[in-house]
Amino acid sequence: MTHVLHKTYLPYIIPAVLCLPLGTACHEIIGHGLVGVLCGGRISSVEILGMQVWPSMHWQGWFGTYGRCGIDPPTERGRALCNLAGSMSTWAVSILAIIVLSWKPWHGWKRAALLSVGIWWVDLLTYTLPTWGIPRSILWGGHYSEPYYAAKDLGVPGPLFQAFVLISSVVLAYFWLRRVRTYSAVWRLGNRSQP
């Protein structure tokens, strides 16, 4: 019985638990960090959920943010791109995961990891919530919308960016839920055939 539980549920539990730290790392390192470097900046520090991971690894404490990438591109446009890239990186990776989920019926750890990454689009949605007066985090509020103001600094009208976020969130939620439902149906059928 324990073996069946481990084989059935463990592949879902571990990726779900790792979803927040890995999503935060993607947001900070790939989004802010990589784009900031491409815009001429230099990474001075990276913090993920209270743990500084660059330039040295040590616990700093969790003080009201999921993460931080200390980078300062030399131009206003570079700073705006860097700020927009955080949430857009997790949004783009979630699209990739949903596409990969559609290719074939993945199983076990791979399916669970892809489903966990496939929901990272929520990062862009939650970071846009403050533009409607809703705090972005249930843990510590947050009333500043980094991607929204970055998009505005790049010349994108605020309502257009909000519409993009809402429409893309609904579309991605639809395709993500389709993948979850497909796998749930396959899982139920597979369990019925076992003695």
Image (cartoon, rainbow, N blue to C red):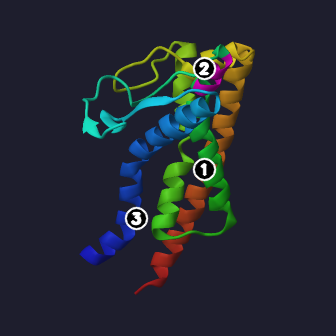
> Residue 144 has which mark?
none
Q: Is residue 73 left or right of residue 57?
A: right
Number of numbered discs:
3
Q: Where is residue 110 in the image (x, y as percent from the top left)?
A: 50, 65
Q: Position of residue 96 (x, y in %)?
A: 65, 51
The foreground one among 155 and 140 is 155
Please state which amino acid type lies under the numbered disc 2.
Arg
The foreground one among 63 and 112 is 63
| Residue 121 appears anywhere in the view | no
Please state which amino acid type lies under the numbered disc 3.
Pro
Please state which amino acid type lies under the numbered disc 1.
Trp
Residue 87: quadrant of the picture: top right
Q: Mark 1 points at which residue?
A: 176
Q: Quadrant of the N terminus?
A: bottom left
* Neighbours of disc 1 within 10 Å: few (<14), some (14-19), many (20+): many
- Circle 3: element type: helix
Q: Report the Cα–Cα distance between label 3 and label 1.
A: 18 Å
Q: Report the Cα–Cα distance between label 3 and label 2.
A: 39 Å
Magenta stretch: helix, strand or loop mostly: helix
* Neighbours of disc 2 within 10 Å: few (<14), some (14-19), many (20+): many
The foreground one among 162 and 82 is 82
Q: Identify the residue at image location x=60%, y=62%.
A: 182
Q: Identify the residue at image location x=39%, y=31%.
A: 66
Q: Mark 3 points at which residue?
A: 11
- Circle 1: element type: helix
Q: Identify the residue at image location x=45%, y=18%.
A: 135
Q: Mark 2 points at which residue?
A: 79
